[in-house]
Amino acid sequence: MSMPSRKLANTSLVKLAVVTAILASLTACAVNPGDPINTVQAEIAAINPTPLQRIENDEQQQQIQQRVQGLLLHPLTLDTAVEIAVLNNKSLQAELFALGVSASQLQQASQLPNPAIMLTRNVSDGNYSTELEFGFNILSLLTLPKVRQLETNRFEQARLLSAQRIAGIIADTRHAYWNAVAAQEVLRYLEQVYTTTEAGAELAKRMLQAGNFSKLDYLREQGLLTEATLNLVKARQLAYNSKATLQQQLGLWQESERLILPDRLPEIPAELTEWRSVIQGGLDQRLDIRLAKLKLELVAQSAGLTKATRFINAFELEVGGNLQDSSERSYKAVLELPLFDWGTYRVKKAEYQYKQAFNEAFATGVSARSELTTSYHNYASSHELARHYKNAMLPIQQQIAEENQLRYNGMFISVFELIADARNQINAVTGYVNATRDYWLAKSQLDMVMIGVSVTKQESTEQQSVSTAADASH
């Protein structure tokens, strides 16, 4: 009777091994996260035409360096500035590697935990026996599909957060570009204001010495020169700071001295983007709304898993065999009894977390629409203001300058009034530059808001125009 028992035991062991192998083959494969970098690129394509690229070796780094150096040989455009930042900004590169970390964590978490093997050797009165035990966590196997779904959603959440941070770096680069170009252009005009005011102050000094000018009028000209000097110093500092911020966003080091900016900002477009396309496209594309929905789904799934396992915290199954006697088998199941912790508080916590996520998702939607509305009206008003400078203020100042030139040629006004008029005209041009800069900043802000990205406030403080209050006395 011993032979049939031994065969039966061997058959049971073979069946168990086969079942274990089948389960392992069905569950051991990790989830494939795909290519998260390409996915992120598709999500921020509206603000970044340059493909994201993770630099993983020296050869790639050299190729990137050559590309950056080639772009720096010419005056920067907005697109080339963004391209340099995408290729060369190390914070952005860190985010791309963070995507790789998240993908690896997903693959690791979605695999079946390794089984445990325990070898036991017993010695008694000179006799010994050896036992081999093989065990795995049944609960991990039963909940693996649910766990995989949860981990996949967590990975999607991490990917959307990385997309937001990468888009934020690009947004800051665009803002830094507009500020740097505008600051350089304003500096050039304020240098002209200073030169003109300095000439007027020098002429007033000579006329005072000749007895042809009152001391009060002389002091007024000196006051204007003092104010022009202060504005020039502020403009130089602003231009330096703006350029340094842009260099930082571009990730420049040795190439920083070779940064070439265009002479002036581009003209504003004649037409505005329609509000309907902004509100519809913005709500559909915003990363923060998608992130809030994904978080809500993740919490809901976690709450379901919590309810399913509220009474079972650990359930393990072990199969043992004696190496000396193949007919000897042992089976052991370990079940943790919920005598003290019945899982009630974990379930209540999960329900509260779901309600919290629901309200946060709703609040995100309300905030998104408000941000879109505010950003669009700021964009529209900036466009209107810049066009008013271009179509109304600048032509009027030009006509005034032409009339004053005729009056000066006819000796009806003094040279000081002509100089004051030149200052006013330059100040109007400076105001137009600032208004144009504000439009492009508002346009960039709207682009970011449409995809749900917060932008670091880098807007320049508008330079104070030279006061012309004393000009009326001339």
Image (cartoon, rainbow, N blue to C red):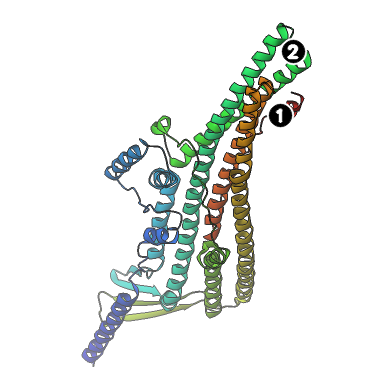
Q: Mark 1 points at which residue?
A: 468
- Under circle 2, the secondary element is loop
Task: Specify few, some or many for label 2: CA neighbours under 10 Å numbering under 14, 14-19, or 20 or more.
Answer: some
Residue at the far left: name it: 3
Residue 213 tag number: 2
Q: Along the polypeptide, which appears first: circle 1 or circle 2?
A: 2
**Which residue corresponds to the image point at 57% horizontal and 39% vertical from the top-left?**
433
Foreground of the two, 239 or 254: 239
Residue 361 tag number: none
Foreground of the two, 329 or 363: 363
Residue 257: x %, y % from top left: 42, 29
Above or below, 356 against 412 in this view is below
Q: Can residue 370 be seen in this view?
A: yes
**Which residue corresponds to the image point at 58% horizontal and 63% vertical from the top-left?**
275
Q: Disc 1 to disc 2, how far (Cα)? A: 19 Å
Q: Quadrant of residue 337?
A: bottom right
Above or below, 192 against 82 in this view is above
Screen quadrant of the C terminus: top right
- Mark 2: amino acid: Phe
Above or below, 378 against 366 in this view is above
Q: In this view, does 341 lie to the left or right of 136?
A: right
- Mark 1: amino acid: Thr
